[in-house]
Image (cartoon, coloured by chain):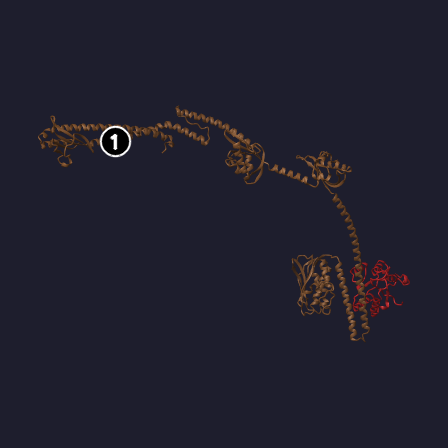
Chain colours: A red, B brown
Amino acid sequence: MNTAIEILLVEDNPDDVELAMFALKKNNFANTVHVARDGEEALEFLFCRGAHSTRCFDRPPKVVLLDLKLPKIDGLEVLRTLKTDPRTKALPVVVMTSSKQQRDMVEGYKLGVNSYIQKPIDFAEFREIIKQLGYYWLVINQPPPPDAFK
Amino acid sequence: MNLRNVPIKRKLTIVIMLTSSVVLLLTSGAFIIYELVAFRSTLLENSQTLAQIVAATSTAALTFDDEKAAAEILSKLQAEDTILQASLYNIQNNLMARYPASQPLENFPAVAQGDGHYFEHRTLNFFVPVSEGDSRIGTLYLKTDLKPIYHRLRLYGGIMAGVLVGSLLIGLALSNWLQKRISEPILELAETAKAVSIKRDYLVRARKFGSDELGLLTDAFNHMLTQIHERDVALTESEGRARAVLNAAVSAVVVIDARGRILDWNVRAEQLFGWTRQEAIGQILADTIIPPRYREAHQRGISQFLVTGKGPVLNRLIELSALRRDNTEFPVELSISPMKTGDVTTFCGFITDITERKEAAEALSLLAAIVESSDDAIVGKDLSGTIVSWNAGAEKMFGYSAKEAIGRKSSFIIPPDRLNEEVLTLVRIQQGRIEHYQTTRLRKDGSTFHVSLTMSPIKDAEGTIIGASASARDVSDRIRAEEEIRALNTQLEERVLLRTAELAETNKELEAFTYTVSHDLRAPLRHIDGFAQILEEELQKNMSTQVRKFINRIRQGVQNMGKLVDDLLNLSKAGRQEVTREAVPLNLLVDEVLSDLKPELKQRSIQWQIGQLPTAQCDRGLIKQVFANLISNAIKYTRPREKAVIEIGTEKNEGETAIFVRDNGVGFNMQYAHKLFGVFQRLHRTEEFEGTGVGLATVQRIIQLHGGHIWAQAELDKGATFYFTLKGIERA
């Protein structure tokens, strides 16, 4: 991998992965995306364990796009783990979910999510959102400095 | 005039005057008669003498038949003015001469009549023979006037009348002076007697005028007065004593005579019946204090007594009703004693008001009846625990008769392990406390049962505790029932817990389900839409209009499905959600909704008429959904209107404030109004007006959650009005 991973997309549904990737590709963000297909994998990736034990902990993605309904460890649990661990606490996490459940929103914000987005059914809208998200988190936003991950 | 009623003064005067005038009249009458007789005989004598003389002197004339001489002699009678007429007749009885000659012949008797005298009216007539020697030679006639006699009589009459009047006047004066001597003491006596009888002043005394019989009478009268006064004083004293006794009596004392007339009436009677003594005395007793239904018996009783000397109510105490002045009846106790004074029988009644006694007795017998009829066992004990009373309830409950129980210590109905309890209770009773407790008791047959017991102190009139009354109720059934209820309750609680747990589980499942629906139903939709769009983009160049249209249909279907999922989620949420009430100004919600709907209104021309809405105690989010639904419906169904009018306001409906949203849209047929609020029920075709048929169902559920109701009024093509009420609407 030559290019540093800038986006971690945590999404179990292959259709969703495909559509998200399509949208990201259209905006030229696709090269820096890593897809984790469940919560466990996401955590392994971020904490450099298991299959990702060779990954360097010093280079976290600029943003994590996190689905909530995930196999093994669900999205909120992943969020809790990230936001309670000092090494990952500073990592920007954007929840992207089909769910409109208020409970999830409340819980997400309480756990310290940086943004909460409901995936619209209209794909055009979705593409617009992806475009804005990528632009914002990868271009506009100043990522946390390395010291924030200690 | 009846002499009897004439005052004694005049009576005396009349007697004196009458006596003296009778005496005077008799005396003067006798005198006048005597005078008259004497005068007549004198007159006769004188006239006869004169006639003799004239006769003697006329003898010659007759003898010689000398008429002239005869007339001469007769004319000499002129000197005697009492002689009215005179005439001479010769022997042949012919008139020879007459006097006065002036008078005509026919006035004289034509012939001489028999000798003698006779009285004519006012005259005395004589025929006297004239004789010569022994031979008669003629007759002389003389007519004498009686006037002097009458003259004298008148004179005497006048004198007599004068004397009579004079002596009567003197007599009157004399009698007036004299009668005083007699009448004055009598009058004085009479005045005194009058004073005594009218003023009842026995201290006045008659004045004594002398020592005659009247003096004696006056003395006797005065003495009598003294005696009367002494007796009167004694009588007043004794009567005063008697009255004081009567008035001091606790009972009303009433004395009546044999005709039933009230003779005496004491102070207590005045208080009891309301009639004063003055008013009562003289009244008929029956009409005063005896109720009408007893009056006849009362009269009968008196009559019977007068005949037989016996009466059914005499000399004993009887109870009956008496009448007050205000016509109210009250119970009295009465005893009547006949009293005989000489021939007169009176009845003395002693009457006591026994209202209080009677009420007390009634209350007592009522209490006794209550105690006796009670299902509870009511047992009286003295302070040592000895039973003194035992009612029917106790007999039934314990199986001992009153005879068996009274006089025994109560320990025979107390289980041995409870004896201590009874002792302690009696101690507390002596301190004046009332004890309530549940315990067990022993029946005669040896079985025990549960009782609810109330033990209270019995006090005598002075408030000293003299015993205890125990009221026991058999609560075996109740305790059994209570135990059953307790068991049932426990079961019920367990069941409720179980159900609650089940319900919680179901709820959790339901939540999980809706979560899944929310998430998993939406995901494929997104995918379909996404891939359809990608497909569209990929085929862009070679795509026929037909294919483009199909792809658009796919994408539209996805949008509809998405909306349906959202609506269904809302509906299920509305059904389960708990209402969190807070005070919300409804105008605020309307404003929020309108602001949310702004994008939809861009192409529309709508005239909004939004009235002043009240503040409601409601769930902000849910009621906002209600307004959002109703308002977006109004917007949707007015779409065909060039000028849409949507009105939001309040109306009074059966005393409740109803909020309404009114539009001038396409409306609907009221025939289908019942379908409005059903899930998936639509009154319009989807091509005309999009919609899922879930919105109004959700609205209705929210309104129901708020204790209100919703209804609609519409007409096809004229618009619709949706009304709803809420429990928490504050008065605007």
* Residue lying at the far right of the rendered structure: A54
**Quadrant assignment, res A17:** bottom right
In the image, residue A53 sits, relative to residue B262, either above or below, namely below
Q: Residue at x 39, y 24 (%)?
A: B213
Q: Residue B529, image x and y in percent? A: 80, 69
What residue sits right under mark 1 in the picture? Answer: B157
Q: Quadrant of residue B436?
A: top right
Q: Which residue reaches farthest top?
A: B211
Residue B579 percent across, percent down from the top left: 74, 57
Residue at image position (63%, 37%) is: B361
A125, B416: nearer the viewer = B416
Quarter of the image with the N terminus of chain A in it? bottom right
Left or right, B118 with reference to B465: left
Using the image, determine if residue B705 lies above or below residue B219: below
Q: Amino acid at mark 1?
A: Gly
Helix, strand or loop status at disc 1 = helix
Q: Residues within 10 Å of mark 1 (few under 14, many from 20)?
A: some
For the residue pair A141 and B686, the one nearer the viewer reads as B686
User: Could you say where residue B112 lies in the image, as x and y percent from the top left?
Assistant: 14, 32
The chain carrying label 1 is B
> At which x and y percent is residue B606?
68, 67
Relative to the observer, which residue lies in front, B708 or B16?
B16
Question: Quick check: can you spot residue B663?
Answer: no
Decide which of B276, A51 is in the foreground and name it: B276
Q: Is residue A105 visible?
A: yes
- In the image, is residue A124 above or below residue B284? below
The answer to which image quadrant residue A43 occupies is: bottom right
Q: Quadrant of the C terminus of chain A?
A: bottom right
**Number of numbered markers:** 1
